[in-house]
Amino acid sequence: MKDYFNYRKIPYLFAFLCFALASLMAFQISWINMSRTLIEEQFDQKVNLAMGSALTDFNKTHETSLDLDELQGCGDDNSLKYFPVEAGVFNLAEQEYLENNLRDYMSCYGIDDKYKVEIFDDSCTVTNGTYCCSIGMPSSSTSECNTDFMLGVSFLSKNDYLNDKIKPMVISSILIFFLLASVSFILLWSLIKQKRITENNIDFFNNTAHELKTPLTNISLALKLLGMTHPEIDDHKYVDIIKEENTKLTTQIDRVLFLSRLESGEYQLQNETLNIYNLLQSVKENMKLLIDVHKGTIEISSEAKDIEILGDYYHLTNVFKNLIENALKYCSVNPVIHIRVAADDKNVNVLFRDNGIGISAKDQTHIFEKFQRVNTGDLRSSSGFGIGLSYVKTVVELHKGLVKLKSERNKGSEFHVLLPNLK
């Protein structure tokens, strides 16, 4: 049934769930790595800015004959700029001044991690966690920078700093992943349990239906034998009531068993070429007694008398009977049913229009579901299992057709049954 979840798809659902969780984990790992890279780049930028600011302030405190604007192009464009100082300026006091100034800028940029500041007079080896900045002044004869001094900053626990920054992301990602995984598997386990319950209910219902069908068959046979041995009671009204009610209950049980066989995939349509107009006339004739009881009227019209479809005679007959029966039952006045057959190159449209009590828009959303009935007014006074329209929808869809409903309360209903045209 398309109105209900197909429990046979649970293995596919489980595989899809595992794939989705694995994809989520891969995405989270990629996101954390990207976040760590961005945090490291921000850290490098802050350190470089702090070193540059400290050296700029340091140079401003010393006299120099150099114009800083002339030094904008000095150095590699991909590295820190060179900052001019006088040769031999780095005595202990000046070094402490530069280090303290650097620490102030580091703190200003939010870097309070452990680090070591050194002044090199030859070269500084750049490694992960070590930052170097050249300090010198241009030679008088060339425009190249003199790199006699280098400022080096080494972070002893850079990785710890980065790990501390991404730790909340890692913890939140793990918690979200396990929360989603837990909820998903709980829902899947509940679905599996519901599948077992549904299967048990279906088995019980089928067994009950079969057990009910046996005495009904015996009742029908007994009535026939009784009529043969006592012809005088064959047309008695009480015998007719027994026959009619026996037929109704047998039909309902057959519908339940049919829907059950459809859900298990056991049933195959017995298709044959059918003249849709003749089929409707046959249904009308067979329901003549019921139509007379309800004092109803049925009018059948067709664009052509030779419109044919490929379908199962038995079940299409039951579909049309069910729609007519509902129109007769759910009517507060004398029922008038108009049945019109129209066809185009692709479809045959069988329209059932009645003057019944109608169906509200709210109830139309679930009227084709199994065991659903409208719980309003006169509708509850009519007996039934609530599988009639579900049966109609299932049979029509098996014929690759479609059922559409248009209705309003107290304004009647229109059922459009669309079936593939044989021509």
Image (cartoon, grey):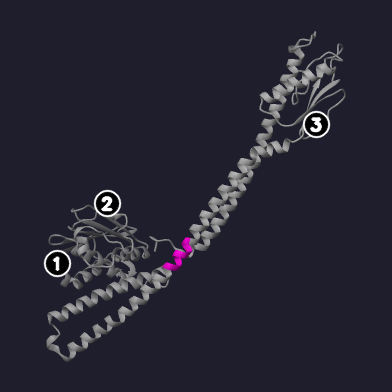
Magenta part mainly helix, strand or loop? helix
124 relative to 14, above or below: above
- State which quarter of the image contains the C terminus: bottom left
Amino acid on which the number 2 mark rests in the picture: Ala
Q: Nearer the viewer, residue 281 or 167?
A: 167
Q: Nearer the viewer, residue 5 or 175?
A: 175
Q: Earlier in the sequence, mark 3 or mark 1?
A: 3
- Residue occupying the far bottom of the picture: 229
Q: Is residue 82 something one can see in this rendering?
A: no
Task: Characterize the local packing of mark 2: few (<14), some (14-19) or many (20 or more) Cα atoms within 10 angstroms.
Answer: few
**214 to the left or right of 162:** left
Label 3 and label 2: CA atoms lie apart by 75 Å
Residue that mark 2 sits on: 361
The quarter of the picture where residue 100 lies is top right
Q: Which residues are magenta?
A: 190-197
Q: Secondary structure at mark 2?
A: helix
Q: In this rendering, which labeled residue sits more in front, label 3 or label 1?
A: 3
* Residue at left offset 60%, top offset 48%: 174
From the top left corner, tell me how far across and down residue 317 is, in percent.
Answer: 27, 70
Residue that mark 1 sits on: 294
Q: Is residue 73 magenta-colored?
A: no
Q: Which mark is residue 52?
A: none
Amino acid on which the number 1 mark rests in the picture: His
Q: Nearer the viewer, residue 241 or 324?
A: 241
Residue that mark 3 sits on: 126
The quarter of the picture where residue 216 lies is bottom left
**337 to the left or right of 167:** left
212 relative to 394, above or below: below
